[in-house]
Structure formats: structure tokens, C-alpha cells
Image: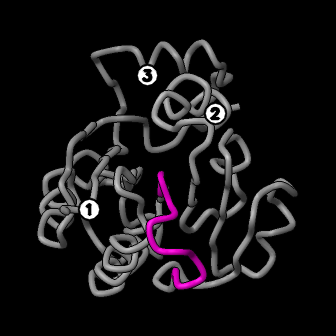
Amino acid sequence: MLWRTLWNHYFSKLVPTDACVLDLGCGYGNFINNVVAGRRIAVDMWPDFPHFIDHAVETVVGDVRDLEFLENGSVDFAFASNVFEHVTQADFAAVLASLRRKLSANGELTILQPNYRYAYREYFDDYTHIAVYTHIGLSDFLAAHDFDVFHVAPKFMPLTVKSRMPVSPWLIRAYLASPVKPLGKQMLIRARPRR
């Protein structure tokens, strides 16, 4: 329900229906399974992830640093949710170098992940987190690797939607529309390769 609502009320406005969408480190496919686009591609190292992905999505079991299976300039919208805090800066830089070639002329990278500035208490509760970013640090890292950041939402979403209260589409829509983001601990950053 969360990802369907996020797609319907936020991401669908960013992605043309004929676009090629790439989901980096897609896990269970929560994002890519809800995307409506001309071409959908999901990449993850987990060998079992294709079992959870819609049959119309192209799946590639592999490292997000290696995007050579894609044609240069073929991706219009690359998405990474909770990926880059799990990899080294050198690996992140390698992903960005690859994406610069694979993104189309107007292609963009959208990143959703914990913002250390607001999630510092819980950040290392996930022992697989190895890199630390705030919305400022991540924007600077992207700029240092030839990406122009054009949108930053420091408190886009809460760190988790698990709670005693039921999660409903109208609550998610209200949160997205609100200028005040209580419990907002995940940032959203949009960037394009510098041409």
C-alpha cells in the first residue's frame, strides 16, 4: 500500500509513461512493481529477488556497479531506495560513473534513504549501514561526481511506517502534501548527470 500510494501520488508525476525506469538494489520490488512505464528494469545481488518481481519487469541478478547490460543513454529514471548507505563511497562513485553513461539526455537519478542528520539515533541499528550521509553531504557527493542536484527533500518520509496505527493511503497522501514533516528521517534527492 505504501509504495502504490507513493507511486500514484508522487513518483508517477516524475516519470513519463513511455520512460525506461531502472530500480537499483530493488529487493522485493516494492517500487518497481508499482511503476507504470514503457520499460521497467530491476537489479539486485540477491539471487531470489526475481521471484518477487512482476513478470513484465526485466530482472538482472548482479551488482549495481555493473550496468553494462544496458545500452548507453537508455535509462530515463534511475531509482535507488535504501541502497547507498550499504556500500562504500568508492562503490557509490562507480555506480554514478556507470549511470552517467546509461542515463538518457534528460535522465535522472532519484535517491531515497535515511538522512543521518535526523536519523542518527537509529542509523546504526541496521548493522549493514557502512556509509553516512546527510542531505547536504549526499548532495555534495553527487556534485563531486558530476551530477547536478536539482531537488532536495531532507525529510521526505519517516524512517519506517511501522506503527500501532494502520497505514492508509490518505495518511500517506496527507504526509506528502504537508509542509511539516513530523518524524521525517528519510531524504529524497533528485539529480542529473552534468553534461
Q: Residues within 10 Å of mark 3 (few under 14, many from 20)?
A: some
Magenta span covers which residues? Answer: 67-79
Q: Amino acid at mark 2?
A: Leu
Q: Earlier in the sequence, mark 1 or mark 3?
A: 3
Which residue does the image show at 70% across and 81% down from the upper left? 61
**Viewer-proximal residue among 160 and 33:** 33
Residue to which mark 1 is pinned: 193
Q: What is the secondary structure assignment of the residue under circle 2? A: helix
Q: Amino acid at mark 1?
A: Pro
Q: Is residue 195 magenta?
A: no
Give the Cα separation between the discs numbered 2 and 3: 12 Å
Residue to which mark 3 is pinned: 176
Residue to which mark 2 is pinned: 2
**Viewer-proximal residue among 165 and 5:** 5
Q: Nearer the viewer, mark 1 or mark 2?
A: 1
Circles 1 and 3: CB distance less than 8 Å? no
Give the Cα separation between the discs numbered 1 and 2: 29 Å
Q: Residues within 10 Å of mark 1 (few under 14, many from 20)?
A: many
Q: Position of residue 75 (x, y in %)?
A: 50, 60
Q: In the rendered image, which quarter is residue 6 located in?
A: top right
Q: Position of residue 114 (x, y in %)?
A: 36, 53
Q: Is residue 87 left or right of residue 180?
A: right
Which residue does the image show at 34% across and 77% down from the upper left? 92
Q: What is the secondary structure assignment of the residue under circle 3? A: helix
